[in-house]
Amino acid sequence: MFKIMLVEDDVTLFNEIRERLSQWSYEVYGISDFSKVLQEFTAVKPELVIIDIQLPLYDGFHWCRMIRAHSNVPIIFLSSRDHPSDMVMSMQLGADDFMQKPFHFEVLIAKIQATLRRVYNYSSERTELKTWRGATIEYVKNTVTNSLGAALLTKNEMFILKILVERKDQIVDREELIKNLWDNEHFVSDNTLTVNVNRLRKKLEPLELDTFIETRVGQGYMATEEAAL
């Protein structure tokens, strides 16, 4: 049974989501003190966090930053605001997915299942090391290391890198990456993938590996052995 922490101050919505998720055998935890979200997260140790953007005291972005400083646990954001910037900010902070309120519960369940399957099945199956451009990629630890240092990636960043590196020198279509990452491209904006790839490049820059992730306009991305001219 997966443990899910639901950071939602709307009691009616919280109870409805908890009831729906319990029907799928998920164990749902709420927040008793919205000034201590990080402490409660640490105590519960959930496998997934669902967090609303608009919360008392501090918003969801604040708590995402706090959680990301300690954990790579998958995070799904909820938002009642119709601002594209909310999705961009969520992905920049390392969120794994985003849901616009109001939403269909079937879609939320599908996103939860896809995220948990991607993160935990992938982690349990991919335990070996991978080398690329002299760097060591450790799938379980979500790290990339070379003589210049180490980069800690989120689950999505590592998953993107894994797909590109295992098919290096081949163009991987944007649509294929989106489908593999989020299972249903209909619910994901194309910009979400762009944000994740840009974040991956930024983390690889100190290792001088960022130039080896090429963008092929109108096609997709490619991990290469030689930097683009």
Image: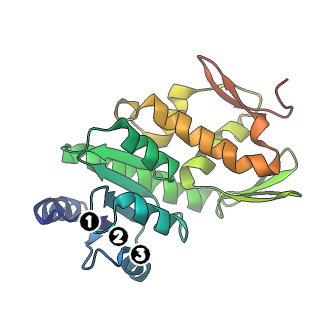
Dot 2 surroundings within 10 Å: few (below 14), some, or many (20 or more)?
few
Quadrant, the N terminus: bottom left
- The residue sitting at 36% across, 60% down in the picture is 60
Dot 1 surroundings within 10 Å: few (below 14), some, or many (20 or more)?
few
Q: CA distance from mark 2 to mark 1?
A: 6 Å
Amino acid carrying mark 3 in the image: Leu
Does the residue at mark 2 contact the one at mark 1 (Cβ under 8 Å)? yes
- The residue sitting at 62% across, 50% down in the picture is 158
Residue with the mark numbered 2? 1
Residue 90 percent location from the top left of the image: 43, 49
- Residue 36, above or below 110: below
Residue 172 percent location from the top left of the image: 63, 28
Res 104 → quadrant: top left
Q: Secondary structure at mark 1?
A: loop
Amino acid carrying mark 2 in the image: Met
Q: CA distance from mark 3 to mark 2?
A: 22 Å
Q: Is residue 132 left or right of residue 170?
A: right
Residue 122 percent location from the top left of the image: 56, 54
Q: Earlier in the sequence, mark 3 or mark 2?
A: 2
- Residue 193, above or below 171: below
Q: Earlier in the sequence, mark 3 or mark 1?
A: 1
Q: Secondary structure at mark 2?
A: loop
Q: CA distance from mark 3 to mark 1?
A: 25 Å
Residue with the mark numbered 1? 25
Residue with the mark numbered 3? 38
Res 145 → quadrant: bottom right
Q: Is residue 168 left or right of residue 76?
A: right
Q: Nearer the viewer, residue 23 or 71?
A: 71
Residue 131 visible, this orientation = no
Does the residue at mark 3 contact the one at mark 1 (Cβ under 8 Å)? no
- The residue sitting at 37% across, 44% down in the picture is 86
Which mark's residue is nearer the viewer, 3 or 2? 3
